[in-house]
Image (cartoon, rainbow, N blue to C red):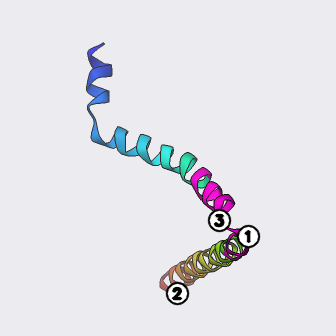
Amino acid sequence: MSEVLILLKEKWLWIIVSCLILIFILPFFIVMVLLTLPEPLNAIATLLLILLWGVVTGYKDWLMHRKKEMSTRQG
């Protein structure tokens, strides 16, 4: 029983638990906000969300390609 109490006092455990809760709950709130917006704004917000998602994905791919390119140059 004392191992469980020691584990529950660890800071990293609560950081991981809170991050997992945010990962599951935050998209729900984003969808709810998009649904409650008035008619022209919810379409604009949805398109903006899709556009920003594409930009972030492209940036991530560019960073991964750059890292791979740097590692091949060094060794």
- Left or right, 21 with respect to 45, comes to left
Residue type (three-letter) at the residue carrying disc 3: Leu
Q: Going 70% across and 70% down the picture, which residue do you hit?
A: 46
Q: Is residue 32 highlighted in magenta?
A: yes
Cβ–Cβ under 8 Å for marks 3 and 2? no
Q: Nearer the viewer, mark 3 or mark 2?
A: 3
Q: Residues within 10 Å of mark 2 (few under 14, many from 20)?
A: few
Q: Going 52% across and 79% down the picture, which residue do you hit?
A: 67
Residue that sits furthest to the front in the current view: 38
Determine whether 31 is above or below 11 in the image: below
**Sequence-first tag of 3 and 2:** 3
Does dot 3 land on a helix, a strand or a loop? loop
Q: Is residue 51 highlighted in magenta?
A: no
Residue of label 2: 73
Q: Going 67% across and 74% down the picture, which residue do you hit?
A: 41
Residue type (three-letter) at the residue carrying disc 2: Arg
Q: Quadrant of residue 63?
A: bottom right
**Sequence-first tag of 2 and 1:** 1
Mark number for residue 62? none
Q: Position of residue 48 (x, y in %)?
A: 66, 77
Q: Position of residue 59 (x, y in %)?
A: 58, 80
Mark number for residue 37? 3
Cβ–Cβ under 8 Å for marks 1 and 3? no
- Left or right, 38 with respect to 60, comes to right
Mark number for residue 39? 1
Q: Position of residue 40 (x, y in %)?
A: 72, 75
Q: Residues within 10 Å of mark 3 (few under 14, many from 20)?
A: few
Residue that sits furthest to the bottom in the current view: 73
| Residue stretch rendered in magenta on the structure | 28-44
- Per the picture, the main secondary structure of the magenta-coloured stretch is helix
